[in-house]
Amino acid sequence: MTSNADIQARRVSAVPRGVSTMLPVFAARAQGAEMWDAEGKRYIDFAGGIAVLNTGHNHPTIKAAVAAQLDNFSHTCFQVMPYESYISLAEKLNELVPIDGDCQTLFVTTGAEAVENAVKIARAKTGRPGVIAFGGGFHGRTMLGMALTGKVVPYKVGFGPFVSEVYHATYPNPYRGISVADALASLEALFKSDVDPLRVAAIICEPVQGEGGFVIAPPEFLQGLRAICDKYGILLIIDEIQTGFARTGKMFAVEYAGISPDLMTMAKSLAGGFPLSAVTGRKDVMDAANPGGLGGTYGGSPIACAAGLAVLKVIEEENLVARAQEIGELMVGRLTAMQSRNSLSCIGDVRALGAMVAMELVKDRDSRTPDADLTRALVAKAAERGLVILSCGTYGNVIRFLCPLVASNELINEGMDILESILEELTAA
């Protein structure tokens, strides 16, 4: 049997350190919400491949759809000889998104590609160059993606200069004392000090910041963005790459705000682990780009499109939107019970939208000083005990929970038991 240590030694030699890996263990197989490493050790998966596996590992419906597609063909390039599955999946997304009017969808491969293309489309439609994003936001590791991302370490260090005409406003964060009014005022301040609003093509915003710490945008903030965009003729891009496809207890998180975006970017759980991303928007906006201006050799892979159609079927048949609410309630209940104990005063905040759940770790609740060291120790110890969790946040002090929505209550409670015992040990020490 090949050991994790042997593979790690090869990894250090063969793969650059810039491609960081959280754990020095290597996956051998996975099913549902469980994984097994190269040495046969079992892990409960509370990471979901960073929100990619809402339908779980190796879902039989998705496997069957992919196998059937492989029997037919694996690739033609949609721009050379198109195929119906691309169109069928586009039709379904056009119906699902909360965008008013007729919609169209473009498929590409990664979330960063979706973001890049959304900005291209917005610039083509408006004839304007500027784009506004938010501090703490994450939109990818491409040059434009990094420019839009509102977090320097580790994403931007050493990679500049970045794309011009990108500006950052403040994102609301009640736990850190930033109100909706503060955040909206920061936009108007940008228009006074940095950019004429009539030069801005788009505002791009995550309805829940992912890498930024699972900070949830209040509905009135997104409603305020919609009003500002309408006032100045700016297009609103909602980035649902991490929040989409039932994770938040609705198909898309922006539905909580009751607004209609102009464009939406999607990826991650769209295809159950297969590389696929999408830009969906109003038809008059999407059609602004000239023929040949959009696309990509692998964009809308027939295998990924088959998987995407199966994912939507699973979400509907297994009622995963409602299941996300149940999982969120279970996890929040466990975390708030821990938070109420004096021995776990390190839990400063617990927040969730559906099954997009986070706890923020602090050195003390009064000062709310972030405790990144405790967060790192918790992630490492959890893996040793067979639980995979992720950290995030501008200060590196947030644990985010992204377990597959097919996980049972029994499995979730087993994972939370592990988390609780380790947190007790670390704080006692």
Image (cartoon, helix red, strand yellow):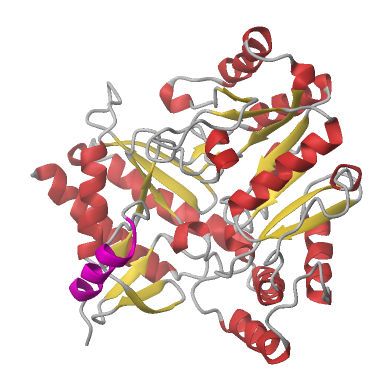
Relative horizontal placement of residue 385, taking residue 232 as reference (left or right): left
Residue depicted at x 51% and y 30%: 161
**What residue span does the magenta drawing correspond to?**
4-16
- Number of numbered discs present? 0
| Residue 354 place in picture, x, y as percent | 55, 51
For the N terminus, give its image quadrant.
bottom left
Vertical arrangement, residue 321 with respect to residue 172, above or below: below
Closest to the observer, 150 or 372: 150
Closest to the observer, 183 or 143: 143
| Residue 196 place in picture, x, y as percent | 73, 14
Residue depicted at x 67% and y 83%: 65
Q: Given the current orientation, which residue lies at the most extreme top position? A: 192
Closest to the observer, 333 or 174: 174
| Residue 233 place in picture, x, y as percent | 83, 24
Closest to the observer, 333 or 261: 261
Prevailing secondary structure class for the magenta stretch in the rendered image: helix
Residue depicted at x 32% and y 63%: 415
Relative horizontal placement of residue 118, taking residue 398 as reference (left or right): right
**Residue 75 in view here:** yes
- Residue 238 position by quadrant: top right
Vertical arrangement, residue 94 with respect to residue 185, above or below: below
For the C terminus, give its image quadrant.
top left
User: Is residue 320 rendered magenta in the image?
Assistant: no
**Residue 262 in view here:** no
| Residue 367 place in picture, x, y as percent | 27, 21
User: Is residue 8 rendered magenta in the image?
Assistant: yes
